[in-house]
Amino acid sequence: MTREELIELLEPAIVRLGYELSDLEVKLGGKHGFLRVFIDKPDGIGLDDCEKISRAVSAILDVEDPLPGHYDLEVSSPGVDRKLTKNAHFQRFTGETVKVQMRFPIEGRRRFRGTLVSSDDENIVVDVDGVSHTLPVATIDTARLVPGVN
């Protein structure tokens, strides 16, 4: 099952419980396989929230059995240096400092650190030292908030 299929499977239950599925990581095989689910809500995430979602996700995984082999389920908050993976994330954190790693060079570089100026379905705009860079969302490798800057 692909990452996207797992998101489609798990996200409705997570949303019904009042949370956002912020991100999902999967590594299977070997002794240290994992499914890591990152959740969020406006007033933050605590241990009780993680336990609640862990129980719900475990129940779905037990019934659907979408992943082969042994893996550990981890549920966590996105953290202060959270990944930005959805257009809604980019819109929510407009004005914040971000680090963006591109898959391919844009304007001769792959790394951009600056203020997230705007976003839409196709691009984000990051201001780096007074110069605006338009970055295609489809070719972003990773984008993260930079904690404690703003």
Image (spheres, rainbow, N blue to C red):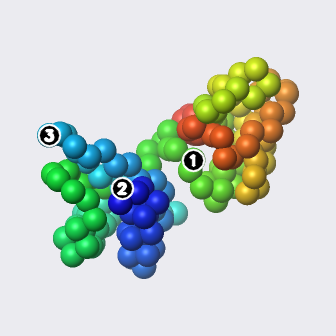
**Of residues 104 and 128, which is closer to you in this image?**
104
Residue drawn at (50%, 39%), measured in percent from left and top? 81
Element type at mark 2: strand
Residue drawn at (36%, 55%), measured in percent from left and top? 37
Mark 1 surroundings within 10 Å by alpha-carbon count, few (fewer than 14), some (14 through 19), many (20 or more): many
Mark 2 surroundings within 10 Å by alpha-carbon count, few (fewer than 14), some (14 through 19), many (20 or more): many
**Of residues 22 and 44, which is closer to you in this image?**
22
User: In the image, is 50 to the left or to the right of 13?
Assistant: left
| Disc 2 target residue | 37
Give the Cα separation between the discs numbered 1 and 3.
29 Å
Residue drawn at (26%, 46%), measured in percent from left and top? 28
The amino acid on which the numbered mark 1 sits, given as a three-letter code, is: Leu
The amino acid on which the numbered mark 2 sits, given as a three-letter code, is: Val
Q: Of the residues under marks 1 and 3, which one precedes in the sequence?
A: 3
The amino acid on which the numbered mark 3 sits, given as a three-letter code, is: Lys
| Disc 3 target residue | 31
Residue 141 drawn at (x, y percent): 57, 37
**Of residues 101 and 83, which is closer to you in this image?**
101
Q: Of the residues under marks 3 and 2, which one precedes in the sequence?
A: 3
